[in-house]
């Protein structure tokens, strides 16, 4: 049915977008995207453009859309995809921030214990 195809297309698009945004998060294990911008790795940007491009081709070329059992998305549906997938960047930024804070506290603790031993 058309509703099932639309739901599958939305789900697939959210998964594709989440994986691309996770790739951005992987630029640095603990550094923020503000410290290490995406253009620091132009090959990653190229890979993301190609991946999204292939996804768009599958959605908007009728023969491929029929083959993959997906349908084109309109502007509002793409906004919904982004609403569900972009938070992965924010979540990872919060986790990285917490990790940096914990590392800094651990380092400070080690430094103060070394000073006491001297």
Image (cartoon, grey):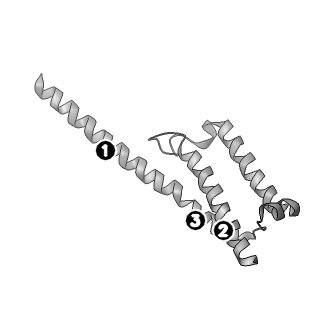
Q: Closer to the camera, 65 or 54?
A: 65
Query: Which residue is painted at 59% across and 56% down in the image?
Result: 18
- Position of residue 50 measured from the top left corner of the image (x, y, whole percent): 75, 46
- Residue underneath mark 1: 102
Q: How far apart are the alpha carbons under marks 3 and 1?
A: 29 Å
Q: How far apart are the alpha carbons under marks 2 and 1?
A: 35 Å
| Mark 3 or mark 2: whose residue is earlier in sequence | 2
Q: Is residue 68 above or below residue 109?
A: below
Q: Is residue 2 above or below residue 41?
A: below
Residue 58 badge:
none
Give left or right: position of 41 versus 106.
right
Where on the picture, by quarter, is residue 3? bottom right
Q: Is residue 116 above or below residue 16?
A: above
Q: Which quadrant is home to the C terminus?
A: top left
Q: Which quadrant is home to the N terminus?
A: bottom right
Give left or right: position of 45 versus 117.
right
Residue 84 badge:
3
The number of discs equals 3
Query: Which residue is painted at 53% across and 46% down in the image?
Result: 25
Q: Secondary structure at mark 3?
A: helix
- Position of residue 47 measured from the top left corner of the image (x, y, whole percent): 70, 42
Where on the picture, by quarter, is residue 45? top right
| Mark 2 or mark 1: whose residue is earlier in sequence | 2
């Amino acid at each position: 049915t058309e509703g099932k195809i639309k739901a599958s297309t939305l789900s697939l698009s959210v998964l594709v977008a989440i994986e691309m945004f996770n790739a951005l998060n992987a630029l640095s294990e603990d550094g923020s995207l503000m410290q290490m911008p995406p253009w620091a790795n132009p090959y990653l940007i190229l890979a993301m453009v190609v991946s999204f491009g292939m996804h768009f081709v599958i959605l908007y070329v009728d023969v491929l859309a029929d083959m993959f059992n997906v349908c084109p998305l309109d502007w509002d549906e793409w906004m919904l995809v982004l609403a569900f997938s972009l938070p992965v960047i924010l979540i990872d930024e919060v986790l990285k921030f917490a990790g940096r804070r914990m590392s800094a506290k651990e380092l400070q603790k080690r430094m103060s214990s070394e000073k006491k031993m001297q």
